[in-house]
Image (spheres, rainbow, N blue to C red):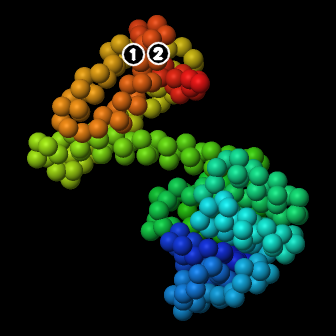
Amino acid sequence: MTDDHATHVSLLGLGAMGSALAETLVKAGIRTTVWNRSAGKADALVARGATEAASAVEAVRASPLVIVCLFDHDSVHEVLDPLADDLAGRTLVNLTTTKPEQARQLAAWAAEAGITYLDGGIMAVPSMIGQPGASILYSGSQEAFRRHTALLDLWATSTYYGEDAGLASLYDFALLSAMYVMFAGFMHGAAMLAPAGVSAARFAEMAAPWLTAMTGELSGYAEVIDGGDYTVAGQQSLEFSNLGLFIEASTEQGVSPEPIAMVQRLIQRQLDAGHGTEGFARIIESIKHPTA
């Protein structure tokens, strides 16, 4: 076991994710102090060997490494702002979901208070923590990441993206945006099939291999986007990609066409601008340059 694993860690916030993070540390034999604003959340962890702090300041003072996994950005400030002096000289790892600018603001606040700051974006649900397939993205203090990588890897595969504290959050939001739009597309398809008596389970059996196969197209789209030339041969044109019939079919099935209508609006803006013969990847221009 490395010296990193011998670190005494304090973890603030015992929601579903915070509890999973703490449980993983306790199982690894790391001295873990936990704190939660509402009572009772720490009982199971204490039974396994964690120490419950009576207050946030007691938790912070217990360890050189402080992990926070709270409800939101405001919660982080509510809990930590009064503890800035106690956090000075310690390392703070923020695993609360925050926007990139909020992460940068927290990093600036930490720097002013003499706190070493590392921000993390968790690419996993609580049940995945400590299991293969989980990933956590980090940015901020490179020294903090280097010093504690072995501990961070107990939770998930850890990847560092740079000193800009907002980068982990930016990657996190970008990846989750792609996920949520994909899920919305699946649910739209399931809704279209429901009036025909097709279950969502049956549709999932069909959709999973289809969507998996389609991810093979991402690198091709990326090459076109990075090259900035939407006229290269081999692309499906915007004219051919017109989704008007999809919207009509959805409406005729009695379901909202909103998910597919969103894509059609992006296409239509490029069609209206005279780019109909260019490739579908050009819709990124509608996204990068929104209308007023």
Q: Residue 208 in the image: state x and y as whole percent.
A: 29, 45
Which residue is drawn at the image coordinates 50% and 47% (left, top)? 176
Above/below status of 134 relative to 49:
above
Q: Badge 2 is on which residue?
A: 270
Specify which label sits upstream in the sequence, 1 or 2.
Answer: 1
Q: Residue 132 in the image: state x and y as whole percent.
A: 47, 62
Q: Is residue 193 left or right of residue 63?
A: left
Q: From where the camera sits, is residue 266 visible? A: yes
Q: Is residue 118 left or right of residue 36?
A: right
Q: Nearer the viewer, mark 1 or mark 2?
A: 2
Q: Residue 259 in the image: state x and y as whole percent.
A: 36, 36
Binning the other alpha carbons within 10 Å of mark 2 as few (below 14), some (14 to 19) or many (20 upward) gives many
- The disc at residue 238 is 1
Q: Nearer the viewer, residue 4 or 168?
A: 168
Residue type pointed to by label 2: Gln
Q: Secondary structure at mark 1?
A: loop
Which residue is drawn at the image coordinates 57% and 17% (left, top)? 228
Q: Is residue 226 left or right of residue 251?
A: right
Residue closest to the far left: 197
Above/below status of 239 relative to 1:
above
- The disc at residue 200 is none
Looking at the figure, which quarter contains the C terminus?
Answer: top right
Q: From where the camera sits, is residue 48 visible? A: no
Looking at the figure, which quarter contains the N terminus?
Answer: bottom right
Above/below status of 240 relative to 214:
above
Above/below status of 229 relative to 45:
above
Which residue is drawn at the image coordinates 23% and 44% (left, top)? 191
Residue type pointed to by label 1: Leu
Q: Residue 11 in the image: state x and y as whole percent.
A: 66, 75
Check whether the beta carbons of the residues at disc 1 and disc 2 lie within 8 A of each other: yes
